[in-house]
Amino acid sequence: ILKAAVAAENGCIVKTMGDAIMAVFPRPVAALRAMLHAQRWLAHPTEFTLPAGINVPPSSLKPLALKAGIHVGPCLAINQNDRLDYFGTTVNTTARLCALCTGTDVILSSATRADGEVAAHLTASAPALTTARATAKLKGFGDAAFEIWRITG
């Protein structure tokens, strides 16, 4: 489901870590659309058609919660073991945002929320999507308070 949602928005899965993925997208709004779609599908699997190529017995479809954090910024990209990988504060921040997610929302950094396409998508999707501003401390970043946006709907 995640592969299909990421691919539908021209994103790329960089790596998997257990049951988590790290993906990159050409634009922040593409990441938001992909994660909202995947989150809806996983929470209500019997209400949606399976993506092409996914063959799962209907009896095995159980609701799942998907935690997602989205951040935008510079990072270090390297080719390691014939695969592109990303490192740096942007990647670390994104992982910490994901940890703040409840599975019924998507957490955006203030930089992501400030993106014009993201703002337009959220405005166009209201009232189906709601946004709530908050501040949070992120593990590994000391006492710094980060502005975050919780997207639900």
Image (spheres, grey):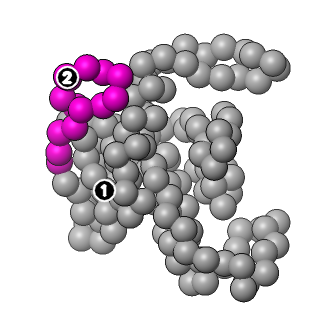
Say above or below: 46 vs 76.
below
Quarter holding the N terminus is bottom right
Residue type indicated by callout 2: Asp
- Give percent across and percent down for residue 56: 78, 75
Say above or below: 80 vs 24.
above
| Mark closest to the chain's N terminus, 1 or 2 | 2
Residue drawn at the location 71% of the way across and 68% of the way down: 51
Residue drawn at the location 40% of the way across and 43% of the way down: 99
Question: Which portion, as a residue range, is magenta?
Answer: 133-146
Residue type indicated by callout 1: Ile
Is 123 positioned to the left or the right of 66 in the image?
left
- Give percent across and percent down for residue 44: 53, 77
- Residue 83 falls in which quadrant of the image? top right
How many numbered discs, if any?
2
Q: Which residue is identified by label 2? A: 143
Q: Which mark is residue 94?
A: none
Q: Which mark is residue 151?
A: 1
Is 17 positioned to the left or the right of 54 in the image?
left
Quick one: label 1, few (<14), some, or many (20+) residues within 10 Å? Answer: many
